């Protein structure tokens, strides 16, 4: 089994987190940007390590990263207003429950319950799409943070 850990993002995550953001936007958001170079450039221009590090300092934003086998594979962000602004997954890591685990963590941050979640996921198999979604639900163990 693979173990996915969702935790608050830190400055040392900037390079990996930005790579996830840029790859996810480029390869998984094609339906939105239609591979239009000017649209894609606009979406990616602020996705830099310097900007990410600055964003982490904003007390109105709460960033999380998801790690799978000690590698950052997801980035999420929720604002104090409750707006979920980011939930991006590394291409090739979709439908493993990573986005759901990040959403749960971000929801806890928004609600003020600083819990640490660890999610264990099964390796995907050749199940139907509906079964994959059902099995992608994260099993979460809450621990003091």
Image (tube, grey):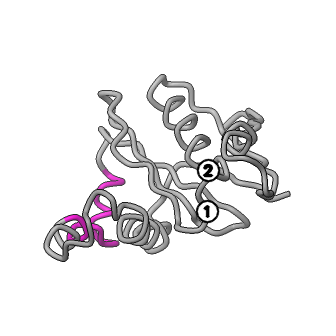
Residue 83, image x, y percentages: 32, 33
Q: Answer few, some or many: residues within 10 Å of disc 1's Cα (few below 14, many 20 plus, some between 14 and 19).
A: few
Q: Residue at x 73, y 32 (%)?
A: 142
Residue 71, image x, y percentages: 64, 69
Q: Quadrant of the C terminus?
A: top right
Residue at mark 2 to residue at mark 1: CA–CA distance: 8 Å
Q: Secondary structure at mark 2?
A: helix
Residue 64 sits above or below residue 92 on the image: above
Residue 58, image x, y percentages: 29, 47
The residue where tag 1 is placed is: 93
The residue where tag 2 is placed is: 98
Check if residue 49 falls in the magenta segment.
yes
Residue 8, image x, y percentages: 53, 49
Numbered disc total = 2
Horizontal arrangement in the rendering, residue 27 relative to residue 93 (left or right): left
- Magenta region: 43-57
Residue 109 sits above or below residue 69 on the image: above
Ranked by sequence position, the earlier of labels 2 and 1 is 1
Q: Which mark is residue 8?
A: none
| Among the 4 quarters of the image, the one containing residue 108 | top right
Check if residue 140 falls in the magenta segment.
no
Q: Answer few, some or many: residues within 10 Å of disc 2's Cα (few below 14, many 20 plus, some between 14 and 19).
A: many
């Amino acid at each position: 089994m693979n173990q996915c850990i969702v935790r608050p993002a830190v400055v040392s995550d900037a390079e990996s987190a930005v790579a996830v953001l840029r790859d996810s936007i480029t390869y998984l958001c094609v339906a939105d940007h239609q591979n239009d170079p000017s649209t894609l450039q606009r979406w990616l221009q602020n996705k830099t390590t310097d900007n990410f590090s600055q964003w982490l300092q904003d007390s109105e934003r709460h960033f999380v990263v998801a790690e799978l086998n000690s590698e950052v594979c997801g980035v999420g962000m929720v604002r104090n207003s409750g707006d979920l602004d980011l939930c991006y997954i590394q291409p090739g890591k979709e439908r493993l429950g990573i986005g759901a685990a990040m959403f749960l963590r971000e929801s806890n941050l928004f609600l003020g319950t600083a819990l640490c979640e660890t999610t264990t996921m099964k390796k995907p198999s050749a199940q139907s799409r509906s079964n994959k979604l059902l099995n992608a639900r994260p099993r979460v163990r809450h621990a003091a943070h």
